[in-house]
């Protein structure tokens, strides 16, 4: 479970929104970061080759559709980045889907305030 802007989110909620959408590949990443003390979430997902070749209008429409599907499931406004097919590295074992860089920023701020 992830806590983002006070909302509990399960990665499986995001996965269900991604996997049910035509034009989206199977590989995705959830990237969490902090921007000005607020949690930020970006979903990086591979578009299928036919969508990638469809041009910017098709990609923008697909990204907006995915963004609103994720928002309806989680209640969060997320950023969606569509990537070229095969842009996300494949692994033989279990795929790492969540990348959280929020803690490193928080620790450095706490350490500075204690000095």
Image (spheres, rainbow, N blue to C red):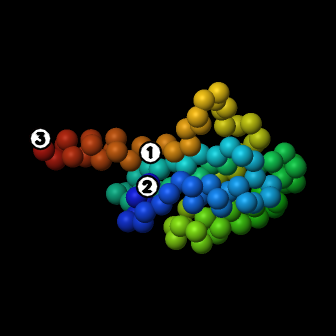
- In the rendered image, the quadrant that contains the C terminus is top left
Q: Residues within 10 Å of mark 3 (few under 14, many from 20)?
A: few
Q: Examine the rendered structure and indicate whether residue 85 appears above or below residue 90.
A: below
Asked whether the beta carbons under mark 3 and mark 2 sit within 8 Å of each other, the answer is no
Judged left or right of residue 78, residue 26 is right
Q: What is the C-alpha distance between the residues marked 3 and 2?
A: 30 Å
Give the residue number, with chain letter if any, for mark 2. 2
**Sequence-first disc among 1 and 3:** 1
Image location of residue 111, percent across then percent down:
19, 41
Asked whether the beta carbons under mark 2 and mark 1 sit within 8 Å of each other, the answer is yes
Q: What is the C-alpha distance between the residues marked 1 and 3?
A: 26 Å
Image location of residue 63, percent across then percent down:
70, 60
Q: Residues within 10 Å of mark 1 (few under 14, many from 20)?
A: some
Q: What is the C-alpha distance between the residues marked 2 and 1?
A: 10 Å
- Number of marks in picture: 3
Q: Residues within 10 Å of mark 2 (few under 14, many from 20)?
A: few
Of 60 and 88, nearer the camera is 88
Judged left or right of residue 35, residue 44 is right
**Sequence-first disc among 2 and 1:** 2
Of 92 and 54, nearer the camera is 92
- In the rendered image, the quadrant that contains the N terminus is bottom left
Residue at the far top: name it.
92
**Helix, strand, or loop for circle 1?**
strand
**Sequence-first disc among 3 and 2:** 2
The residue at 65%/52% (across/down) is 81
Of 76 and 2, nearer the camera is 2
Give the residue number, with chain letter if any, for mark 1. 100
On residue 115, the disc is 3
Image location of residue 50, percent across then percent down:
88, 49
The residue at 60%/29% (across/down) is 93
């Amino acid at each position: 479970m992830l806590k983002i802007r006070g909302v509990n989110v399960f990665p499986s909620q995001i996965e269900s929104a991604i996997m049910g959408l035509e034009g989206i590949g199977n590989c995705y990443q959830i990237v969490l970061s902090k921007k000005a003390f607020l949690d930020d979430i970006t979903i990086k997902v591979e578009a299928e080759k036919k969508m990638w070749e469809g041009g910017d209008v098709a990609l923008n429409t697909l990204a907006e559709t995915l963004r609103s599907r994720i928002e309806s499931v989680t209640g969060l406004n997320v950023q969606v980045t569509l990537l070229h097919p095969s842009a996300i590295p494949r692994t033989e074992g279990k795929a790492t889907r969540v990348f959280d860089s929020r803690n490193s920023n928080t620790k450095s701020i706490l350490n500075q305030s204690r000095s």
